[in-house]
Image (cartoon, rainbow, N blue to C red):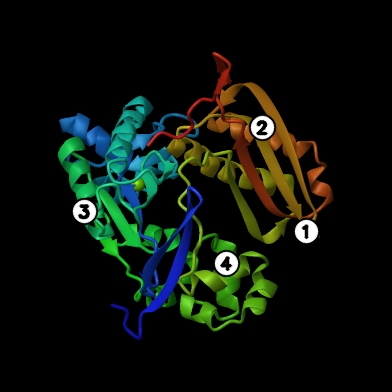
Amino acid sequence: MVTLHQKVFFKTLILNEYYICIQMQIVPVITYRKIIHIDMDAFYASVEQRDNPEYRGKPLVVGGLPQERGGVVATASYEARKFGIRSAMPSKQALKLCPHALFVRPRFDAYKEVSRKIREIFSRYTDLIEPLSLDEAYLDVTQDKLHIGSAIDIAQQIKQAIKDELQLTASAGVSINKFVAKIASDINKPDGLKFIGPSAVEAFMETLPVEKFHGVGKVTAEKMRKIGLFTGADLKNMAEDELIKHFGKVGRFYYQIVRGIDEREVQPHRETKSLAAEDTFAYDLTTLGEMENELDKIAVLVYNRLLKNNLKGRTITLKIKYSDFKQITRNKSFTAPVANLETISNTAKQLLATTSPEDKKIRLLGISLSNFGEPEVKLKGVKVTGQLKLF
Ligand SMILES: [Mg+2]
């Protein structure tokens, strides 16, 4: 029975040269994607506390040891975070903040194995899994394999399975796009679950401080505050071309995201091609001392990202942007993969030295590592490339 407010159309299928008419009823509904972002809680530290009962309930730091040169914190347990210890902090500084903290080196093989098991849990629900690192992933469950339908139920089941099978906790963010799901997973950490539904997304974005926006670093946030932009609501009041004028191409992204629009797909086969960190300075650098100082800090950031992703790269690239916005890059490749803080910062400084650094004012410095892949192995004519990201 076709009623007045139901739209009707006829679809014609061609089947063995016979024309079959099928009558279909279409009810207009807006469909939203169902995206879950899962983030393990203090992952490396939690695995260590699970496997070593003597570490439980204690401030534990996984990463470089304080007595090592350039040792940094990869992950701090929640007990250690109470003392102000954070990822990427020099381990020496962590020890000062909490002299009775325990320091252990990471056991990547163990974390990779746990990661593999977590991914196996995800794959019960969907194949659209995009790992961001060993302990974080996006899942698209718009159509889940078990026909559960509710993304919240799926997130709850995944959290429960991780708890029951792996004795670890995860936090989940559930929403209609990657951007909001990722912010949501951080809200009720640890062991949290936060749902931001279609009708709540815009209001949520309006209250969000600008520094929480994707790609907004300290310098951009400062620039935004200077022109009176403090929250998503302020950004929403700006016209699109105005945002582009102030912030370049990313202005369009801000315009859309503040309206809850983020079309980025969950990409199951995305590989990490390079890892980078850079900094735009509040004032231009003119002396070699200042530049080397900044490179040391940036090297720590890159190093920590390598650690978090368990990657080693063969190529180190230095990026320099001058005060006139001209940009150059210099790189050096090694025969063996590098994942060592000293090599990264020393190479960046050597590359800097080749550019007559004190001739021009520098407004940005960046370091990236690339060329991660394992050497390609030929197997019966099939190219097999080393797996970069396990989850
Ligand atoms: Mg995490």
Respond yes or no on whether mark 3 lies under 8 Å from ligand 1. Answer: no
Query: Which residue appears farthest toward the front when viewing the image?
Result: 18
- The residue drawn where x is 27% and y is 56% is 189
Q: Residues within 10 Å of mark 1 (few under 14, many from 20)?
A: few
Asked if the residue at tag 3 contacts the one at tag 2, i.e. Cβ–Cβ closer than 8 Å, the answer is: no
Dot 3: what SS? helix
- Give the vertical position of 288 relative to 8 (above or below): above
Image mark for residue 347: 2
- Residue 253 has which mark? 4
Identify which amino acid the numbered label 1 is placed on. Answer: Phe
Q: Amino acid at mark 4?
A: Phe
Q: Is residue 186 visible?
A: no
Nearer the observer, 22 or 317: 22
Of callouts 1 and 2, which one flags the residue occurring earlier in the amino acid sequence?
1
Assign the N terminus to one quadrant of the image. Answer: bottom left
Determine whether label 3 and label 1 are within 8 Å by CB: no
**Image quarter (top left, top right, bottom left or bottom right) of the C terminus:** top left
Three-letter code for the amino acid on which mark 2 is drawn: Thr
Q: Which mark is residue 215?
A: none
Task: Please state which of residues 101 and 198 is positioned toward the viewer in this rendering.
Answer: 198
Q: Earlier in the sequence, mark 4 or mark 3?
A: 3
